[in-house]
Amino acid sequence: MENQYKVVVGLGSCGIAAGGLKVMEAIKTKLATMPVQVKLDETGCMGMCYKEVLVEIINPDGKNYIYGNVTPDKVDQIFESHIGQGKPVTDLIVKGQDLATTEDSFFAKQQRIVLRRCGKINPESIEEAMAMDAYKAIEKALKTMTPEQVIEEMLASGLRGRGGAGFPTGMKWKFAAASKGPKKYIICNADEGDPGAFMDRSVLEGDPHALLEGMMIGGYAIGADEAYIYARAEYPIAIKRLKIAIKAAEEKGLLGKNILGTGFNFKIKIKEGAGAFVCGEETALISSIEGKRGMPRIRPPFPAQSGLFRKPTNINNVETYANVAYIILNGAESYNKYGTEKSKGTKVFALAGKIARGGLVEVPMGVPLKDIIYEIGGGTSSGKPFKAVQMGGPSGGCIPANLLDTIIDYDSLNKTGAIMGSGGMIVMDEDNCMVDIARYFLSFTQSESCGKCTFCKIGTNRMLEILTRLTQGEGREGDIERLEELSDQIKRNALCGLGQTAPNPVLTTLKYFRHEYEAHIKDKKCPAKQCRPLIKYHILEDKCIGCTACSRVCPVKAISGEPKKVHSIDSSICSKCGACKEKCRFGAIEID
Amino acid sequence: MSNCNCCCSQDNKYFDKLEAILKNYAGNEADLIPILQDIQAAYGYLPKDVLNKMCEKTGMYPTEVMGVATFYSQFRLVPTGEHVIKVCFGTACHVNGSEKVADALADELKVKIGETTEDGKFTLETVACLGCCSLAPVMMIDEETHGRLTPDSARNIIRDYYATGRA
């Protein structure tokens, strides 16, 4: 088995969406015609989403090469040359041993703890996970540590909740452990609802065992024997792989009764969410598991005292649990050597938006934002100037270019008005309108507000109305002040995190891009030329050659002109869809 | 029988799927969401008569069931078209122009977001995030994901469905 080539195709959601299954088929067909024995396997997210579909070829001597942007028609060339003749196709390789590529800087500053096995193992094979240390930490905990020692180790590690708020995980466990009662629960919040975030999905799809083991250790620490994973229904592949992982762990005696002969019992069930962002809030999530509308409850009592079915419950998110086994197996010091004074370890980010190299990255805490955006991410995808990065989704904020020296650390990020959040990082360039971004997030929180608190239910609605009218050129004097007043009221009076943080996208854009709001209100202009009612398309006479491409693509027939003569746009008909500008090869269409 | 809107014209057959689903559950309150998910998977949406029957069988209150069914975005109370298009409105897709993609689709299909085409072939919806942010803007038609869209390419995908007889 060792003396053969191994081929691994990245089949996370991104890989599949980019056509990974078709590439897999092409490889199977190709291999059937080749005389060599090759082991073909699949894996989860390798991180370089911008180069999907990714195919890794591991030589019999162990050297490995990752090919990027693989399409079915490139399979023939790659396999004939690499496996047939032993010559890797260096032009198509994005990462290779003893081979420098332009993509190496994507990995240079990364440190993989949460993603230690993602993209390396077949997520549907417990054996491959176990060959890379899976379930060694739970064995160590059960056989050599008391629950108190496990909690001490977690406290020493400095791990803070990766769902956004950053509460120390060891403390949370200590509170749940201190609650009396024979029945306790462990819950994993896998309801990754932030639009633009896919860290948890990648872990669930790439290494579900990291999550299961973390939950087991949590269960042992607090004295729980039953657990739920509350997963987004929009993640069908993640749910499928979790089910396979749970079944495999049960068959190996790693889940169930009397685990590893230690008397510890633990079972894990999956609950599929039904689509409600507010269920990311822990008490709303508990209501949802109980079969009710997912509406938050007043805390206290905290779930550690009275949670699921009124029993003591500990809730963490996927990334938090995925850190646990590493900490227990390698000791707190091997974890807290990474990071800053108050933010230890690493953090996974989903780098997306207008970024050249979007993907899943894991960096030690303390790294400056600019390193992530420029060195790892390669700057903007458009080549246009960077404008801002949005962190923390609807609860977070926009950090402008002049603050890119800010380091990744809970407290430093909070100072900017944004938050660490769960790890979504959306990059924007100068073409993105900040008022529109604020409107976008408010339309999200407004529609996801559960309706329990007046300030959130009605307040977000009023904010959305104002923002919508700004982007439609109907802004009024005093709108900025009204937004600020509403923001203040909602932040102070909403019951749960959804409402309390909903104004953040508005407040941070007001703080750093107030001039854009003013331009919308006073000048009725959108400086980013994005808000349709505030812009006008027109044709540059000196550039138009009359090719007619624009008039043919215009869906509302607003463009007229004879072939080979300068065309013109009737702005009373123009719907400002931008199709003409995209089609024009001569740069003859401009926006005012 | 009065509410049965299916083609079988047999009351008991219409509710067979429901009966089969309910056998898997004890009928506790905590089972409500999974039961609704199963009903939707079996019937394509949540038909009112099936929900009423479910309440009869389990003793759950219709108000409670409707409260849950209308709270979560996954549940549909009206049938969909043959194919469901979900245009991703996640942040990465938004900054890369998903609104223009959705507008082009709405124009191509002559529907508004949330509606079904007159021929019953397509329902046009938006979704908060599909999580394939690096391929933004993205849409999903049934189970298939289409990435790196432009308004034009999105239109072409629909035309291709009609041209190849898939719709």
Image: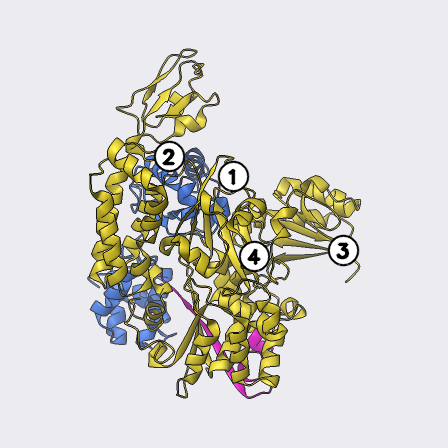
Chain colours: A yellow, B blue
The earlier-in-sequence mark between 3 and 2 is 3
Quarter of the image holding residue A7?
bottom right
Q: Nearer the viewer, residue A378 or A517?
A: A517
| Tag in front: 3 or 4 | 4
Residue A369 is situated, as x and y percent measured from the top left of the image, at 51, 50
Secondary structure found at label 3: loop
| Tag in front: 2 or 1 | 2
Q: Residue A37's mark?
A: 3
Say which chain tag 2 marks: A
Q: Which residues are magenta?
A: A249-275
Say which chain tag 3 marks: A
Instruction: In the rendered view, tell whether residue A385 sits above or below residue B11.
Output: above
The earlier-in-sequence mark between 4 and 1 is 4
The residue identified by callout 1 is A381
Q: Does the CB distance between marks 3 and 2 fall below 8 Å?
A: no
Query: Residue B16 in magenta?
Result: no
The residue identified by callout 4 is A363
The residue identified by callout 2 is A528
Q: Residue at x 41, y 82 (%)?
A: A184
Say which chain tag 4 marks: A
The amino acid marked with disc number 4 is: Val
Q: Nearer the viewer, residue B109 or A158?
A: A158
Mark 2 and mark 4: Cα distance apart in space = 32 Å
